[in-house]
Amino acid sequence: MRALLHLVVFGLLLVTGQTYAQSKDNSLQNYSDFLEILFYESTPYIKVKKIDATSSHAAVVNEQSSFWEFITTNYIARLDYDALQQIKDTTVVEKQVMYHMEQDTTFNHLVSTYQAKVIDHTQPKDTVTIDNILNVAVKFFNITGINTQGHYTGRICVGIHALPKTEKKRSPYLEAFAFDAIINHLTSETYPFYDDYKESIYNVYKLNLGTNDEEQLLRTQGAIFIQMFQSPQLKQLLLDEYERKKDILPFILKSKTS
C-alpha cells in the first residue's frame, strides 16, 4: 500500500512538473528570454534576440523579430538616458533597463494580451479588414522635409512615422505587423511597393501644394498616404504576409466575402 502511495505521489509530481515546464516554455513574461540590452557606444538599447528553436513559442519571436522591435521601440516609456549615463557598470545598466520594461504597464499589457490571444488561446483574436491594416501601413512612408535643392526627403523607420499624429486610437499589433512586413521587403522584387513610394513622390512634384514649406509638407504627406493606400504591391504584400504568419498574429483578417 505504501509503495502504491509513493508511486501515485511520484506520478503526480511528474505530471505537475511537466505542466509547469510547458507553462514556463509557453510564456513570454520572462523578457530576458527574447530581449537583450546592448550598447551603442555607452547608450543602452533593447534588441530582440532569437530564442531556442526547440521552444514551443520560437516562431512568435524568431519569425517576426521586427514586430517585437516595433513594440519595444514605440510602446515602452522612454528611458532616462541622462541618469543611465551616470552609471558606469554596464551590468547595473542592463538590470535597470530590464526593470524599466518589467514596470511598464503598457508594454506588459501588450505582451500579456498577445500571449492570451496567440499562445494560451484564452482571449479571442481581434477581427480586422485589409483597409484597417493599410491605414496604418501607409503611415510608414514618410516625407521628412525639403532639402536645399527643393527636393523631398523621405524615410521609413521604426521610430519615425506619422502614426502618433494621425491615429486617435492606436493599433499596436497592426502597426507592428505592417512595419515587420514593410521593413523586411523593402528591396523585394516580388512586392516592388518601394517603387510605388518613389513614384508617388515623383507625382507630387507636379502639383503646387503650398506657399510655404510647412503647408507643402503637410499636403504632400497626405497625397503620399493616399497613393500608397492604393498601391496593389503593398496590399498584396500585407495579404500574403498575413497568410504566412496568421498563426502567430493576434488578429484575424476578415475576408471580403465574410
Image: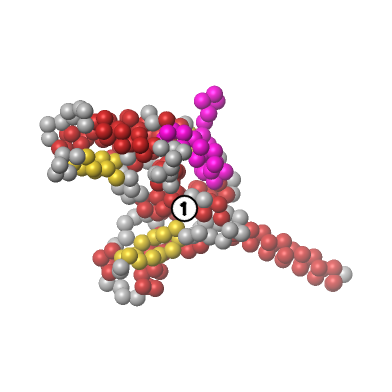
Please state which amino acid type lies under the numbered disc 1: Ser
The span shown in magenta is 233-258
The percent position of residue 74, horizontal first and vertical second, equals 36, 50
Q: Residue at x 46, y 38 (%)?
A: 190
Residue 54 visible from this viewpoint: yes
Examine the structure image and report whether residue 241 is included in the region drawn in magenta.
yes
The percent position of residue 193, horizontal first and vertical second, equals 39, 37
Which sits in the foreground, 100 or 191?
A: 191
The percent position of residue 163, horizontal first and vertical second, equals 32, 41
Q: Residue furthest bottom?
A: 89
User: Quadrant where the C terminus lies?
Assistant: top right
Number of residues whose C-alpha sits closer than 10 Å to that of mark 1, classed few (under 14), some (14–19) or many (20 or more): some
The percent position of residue 232, horizontal first and vertical second, equals 42, 30
Q: Quadrant of residue 20?
A: bottom right
User: Quadrant where the N terminus lies?
Assistant: bottom right
Q: In the picture provided, is 16 more to the left or to the right than 198?
A: right
- 145 above or below 227? below
Q: Quadrant of residue 203?
A: top left
Which sits in the foreground, 154 or 226?
A: 154
Q: Residue at x 30, y 47 (%)?
A: 160
Query: What SS does tag 1 mark?
Result: helix
Q: Residue at x 76, y 68 (%)?
A: 10
Q: In the picture provided, is 157 more to the left or to the right than 58?
A: left
Give the residue at mark 1.
65
Examine the structure image and report whether residue 138 is included in the region drawn in magenta.
no
Q: Residue at x 22, y 35 (%)?
A: 218
Q: Quadrant of residue 201?
A: top left
